[in-house]
Each structure stands twice: as structure tokens, then as C-alpha cells.
Image (tube, helix red, strand yellow):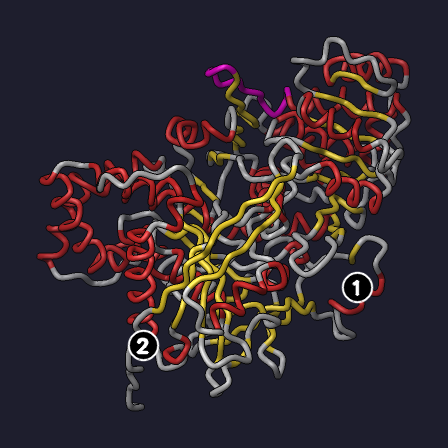
Amino acid sequence: MQTQATTFPRRLLEHARERPGHSAYREKYLGIWQSWTWAQVNDEVRALACGLAALGFERGMRLAIIGDNRPRLYWSMLAAQCLGGVPVPLYQDAPAADMAYVLENAGIHFAIVEDQEQVDKLLELQALYPGITQIVFDDERGMRHYRQPGLVSFARLQEAGRTWDSAHPGFYDAAIEAGQGSDHAVILYTSGTTGKPKGVCQTHTALLAAGSGGVAFEKLTERENVLSYLPMAWVGDCLFSFAQALVAGFTVNCPESGETVMTDLREIGPTYYFAPPRIFENMLTQVMIRMEDAGTIKRAMFHRFMAVARRCGADLLDGRPVPLGDRIAYALGQVLVYGPLKNVLGFSRVKVAYTAGAAIGPDLFRFYRSIGVNLKQFYGSTETCAYICLQPDGQIKFDSVGMPAPGVDVRLAENGEVLVKSPTLMEGYYERPDATAEAIDAQGFFHTGDAGVFDTDGHLRIIDRAADVGKLNHGAIFAPNYIENKLKFFPFIKEAVAFGDGRDMVCAFLNIDLEAVGNWAERRGIAYAGYTDLAAHEQTYALMQECVEKVNADLAGEALMGHTQIHRFLVLHKELDPDDDELTRTRKVRRKFIADKYAVLIDALYGGKPSQFITTQVKFEDGRSGVVSADVRIADCRTFPVVTTAAA
């Protein structure tokens, strides 16, 4: 659809005119899918915007939005934009103290939240940040006896909005007409891997350019279905579930809860899907667990046809020539294994699936494409509306993030840092001109902080964060994220943190995947009391050592990375957790924080010790604190001679 609409509210009006009866949003509630057409959404947003205006919300104000993915929260983003305001989505699982920084930094006085849990957080926050004066809640369960001033239900606000709209004819339409493409459409806060989060100000023009670019690139139409389940505060969800949905007019489906996502995914059967690598890793882990529990015949059939898929599945998907025998074997595997497997995963109707947010291991990438899932990587950042590089059909490389997207200029600095100039680039960091000037140079290029290289075909390969790339003492390049992704391909390893910069060898922390290793342990009659107990078990260490040594054997075959094999490792006594500041809310490793927090373990790894006692403070979900103590064992592992290939 070609359109001249320059803001998201105008896009909404267009869809209401052009496809009023088409399903725009769906939500599963109490096991039943509810649906709203574009015409209905237009009416809902109008009532909400007028309700906010009645409360005193004005052009230029910021509106906090907190909760799981819900149609009404997406409508809240649109309602704020209709009035010339700026939505600021927050991570719904963030503790109250973390929210306080964003609320105060953005100067927020109005908030629309999902339920009682989020209301309680904001009421608690008023002691830290008294600026919140109006709180609107969607789910009324548990809210009957709340009488705090400035608290109103979503339904009552819309009711008041309809009354206010009747009393102020022309106001709503004039407010939308006053909107410009250069207005801020959203403020998204960065994950804060290296410090306090920064508010990224994206205009309607920039976000619409990213949405339009992706829609055109993949030839998306209003017939697509997308499952919206990732945090609304993350740029990936803002691009796929908001910007692209309002460009193409396709249907956004919200699951009932985080626990029902996989079930809801199978019910919806999306045609367009997006997930960070962690989700695809979890799915593969579940597949492997089920295969381990399957009967002998079924397990043998799975492994046999997966060997066929690894041999030719990706080539078939890309339209490359494949021998007739392999084509026949793959067709049989499609009936017996790949088709049923995609159905279980909810991928039967997927035309394109995307992953981003962190590098995905080539092995994991190859697995999904080999069974016929058109999985692609794209590369972007919050500052570029997640729009820098895309992978064209038929030109998929497992170790690259694709080629520069249409309209995007990508260059490499002398030190290998990726520089980007794009119409999707942020206007700047909110009230941080110093940080903006540091990120965007005089030529208008954004410094991503990522280190990359272009191959001979013009595909960009991201090595690691530029700040994380280092060297071992003997001169070998050290890219920790590259090593960590290889480790996390194994379903038994949930997280990994590699160390080696300025040292003689590489060592690593591992987190086991409790479900995968727990299932493995139960089938072997290994008793354990919990994560700490299982992580320290001798047989768990043997399993981890087997995985690490397979990675070492793989690294040995790569001339560039062969000298960064892992010499020693340990299994952490606790899971790395965003609540303990070890991971960001998007589950990126906060490497420096972890190195400082667990310095005693790093010293033990490099000091040759066989074990190290440690006591660690942890935070529980209810806000309480506690300690976890353990005598962490350290294991040595085998390394392999580096294979060097003579130049052709």
C-alpha cells in the first residue's frame, strides 16, 4: 500500500478508511481469542486520546506504558501520539527502583499500565519519584478497593473521553492534523550494558522509514499475522508489532500470558515471526529434550533425517541445486520429521522469521533453515530503529547479518567499528546532547560500537562489540561473544561468559539450562536438590566438559579463532539474572559488571586453583535479598592443534 501519511495516527485513520473490517489486533483472554478491526481500533484510540486530554495530557508530554503485550497498551501509544505526546514503554519486569530512573529522566507524569502489579510498583515509586500524578490501569482485577488520587480504569477513562469528545468537537481531528513527521513518535531506553540507560528519541519519519523498508523488502501485506510477545520497551517489538503493523495493516496477536506463548504460537500459526536468539535456543532445547525422551525408533528416525537436513535443507530453501537422491530423502523427511516438527514449534505457516538483538550461532541458524524455516538475521540498534542490515532471499550466510538495507549507508572505521548513516537514525538521546555528540559524528554517521568486517560479496559480519574485542597476550584476536554463541548452541548451556583479553588463555563461566540438564539427570537417576546442587554435580561437569571440548575442536578449524580455545571453565553456582544486574532486560551479558562481581572466581580460573568458595548476594522476585554460597569447582579441558589452510 502506497501512502503519504507522515505520522502513525494518520496511518491509523488510513487503515480505518481502507480496511475497516480487517482484523487489526487479537488478544487471547481466558482461553478465547478476542478481535478488533481497524475501524474499532480507531474508535478505541479516539476515546482514549480524548480521555487523556480531559485529564490534562498535552502536546509534548511523555506517557509511560508498562505491561505485557496488550492491544490496549499499543492503543495507548497511538493515543499519546494523536495528542502530540510521546509514549515511553518501560520493561514490565523491571523492579520499581529501576523504573524510577527512567520515569524521572523522561519527566513523566502520566502512565498507562496493565494491571494491579504495575499499579503497585508505581504507587511504591511515588516515594522515589513523586512526579507520577495520573495512573490508568487496563485490568481491573484486584483494584476494587484502591482509592488513591489520580487512579482511574482504562474503561472509565474512555467513557470520560467520549463525553469530552462530544463537548469539544473538532479537537481530536485538529490534534492529529497538527502532528508532523519530525515529532517524536517514541522514546525507547537502551539496555544499559555499559551504564545508565539512555532515552533514544525516534521521530515518526524515522520509525515509519524503518517500517516501510522492512515491509517492502519482505513484500509483507495486510494478510500477515504476527505474534507480539516480546517487551514493548524493546526496539524489536516497536518495529515489528507497531511500525510495520501500521505500515502494512497486518494483524497483531497478543498471547494470554508469558506461560502460554508457545501454545498461542501454535494456535495462531503466524506468517511472520520475530524472536531473539535466546528464544530460538530455548525452542531447540525443548526439541532435543523431547527427542531424548522419545522411543528408540523415533529417535533414530529423527537423527537420520536431521543429517539429511543438515546436508541439503538450507540449499533447498535457497533454491540451490541439490542431488536427486537428497531431494527424495528430504521430501520423505518433510513428511515424517520436518513438517511435524515445524507444526509443534508453530512455524507451519511462517513465510519469514527474523532474529536479532544478539549474534546467533551459525549452528543454531543452520538448524532452523535446514528444516525449512526461512530464518534470517537482521542487524540494527535502538538508535537506528533496528534497521541497518537485512538478508535477501537466496543470499543467506550463516556467519553474516546480511547487506546494508535499502537507503542505509554502512561503513567501517579504521578500527573496524561499524558506522551507519540512515533515514532511520535517532534524532538524539533525550536531554543528553553530550552522549548524542559522542554517538553521531560530524558527518552524520552513528558509531554503533560493534566491530565488523565486509566479505567479498558485501555481506557484513559482526565480530563482537568493539569494546569487548581484545587480544590474548600472544596476539590472537579475542571475540568473547563469538565463543559464547558457540557454547550456547548446546541445549545444556543457557548462558556463557568468556574471558581472555590481556591474558595467556581463554577461560569461561557457564550457566546450565536447568530444564535440559535436569531432564538429562533424571534419565540417569541423578538426584539433585536445585540449581546449585545440579550445577556442582560431577556428572554435570563431565557433560559441560564434553560441550566445551566440542567447541574447542570447532574453533581449532578456524584460523582466525583457533588460538582462542577454552582452557578452563566453571559452572556458576547461580543463574545470571537481570534482577541481579548481571544481564540487561534483553538478556545481554553485562560483561564488566560480571567480571567485577566474580573477580575471585576469575582469579581462581587463571591461578590454577581446582575450586573456589564464594558467597553471592541475590535478589528474589518479591524484592527480598538473600545469599547463595558454594564451593565452585574448576575444570581443565582439552584443546586441539589449530588447523591452518594454505592460501589458494
Q: Is residue 107 left or right of residue 282?
A: right
Magenta stretch encompasses residue 39: yes
Task: Of the two numbered discs 2 and 1 on the same chain, state the one appearing first in sequence.
Answer: 1
Mark 1 surroundings within 10 Å by alpha-carbon count, few (fewer than 14), some (14 through 19), many (20 or more): few
Q: Quadrant of the N terminus?
A: top right
- Judged from the image, the secondary structure of the residue bearing numbered disc 1 is helix
The residue lying toward the viewer, choosing from 628 and 130, is: 628
As for residue 467 lying within the magenta part, the answer is no
Judged left or right of residue 146, residue 275 is left
Residue, x 19% and y 41% (percent of image)? 337
Q: Say if 471 sits above or below 201 in the image.
A: below
Three-letter residue code for mark 1: Ala
Q: Is residue 638 left or right of residue 85?
A: left
Looking at the image, residue 258 lies above or below residue 599: above
Amino acid residing under circle 2: Ala
Q: What range is drawn magenta here?
A: 30-40
Q: Quadrant of residue 466?
A: bottom right
What residue lies at 65% left-to-right and 31% top-to-bottom? 67
Q: Is residue 338 visible?
A: yes
Label 2: how many Cα within 10 Å (few below 14, some 14–19, many 20+): many
Identify residue for label 2: 556
> Label 1, on which residue?
435
Classify 291 as above or below 416: above
**Of marks 2 and 1, the one in the foreground:** 2
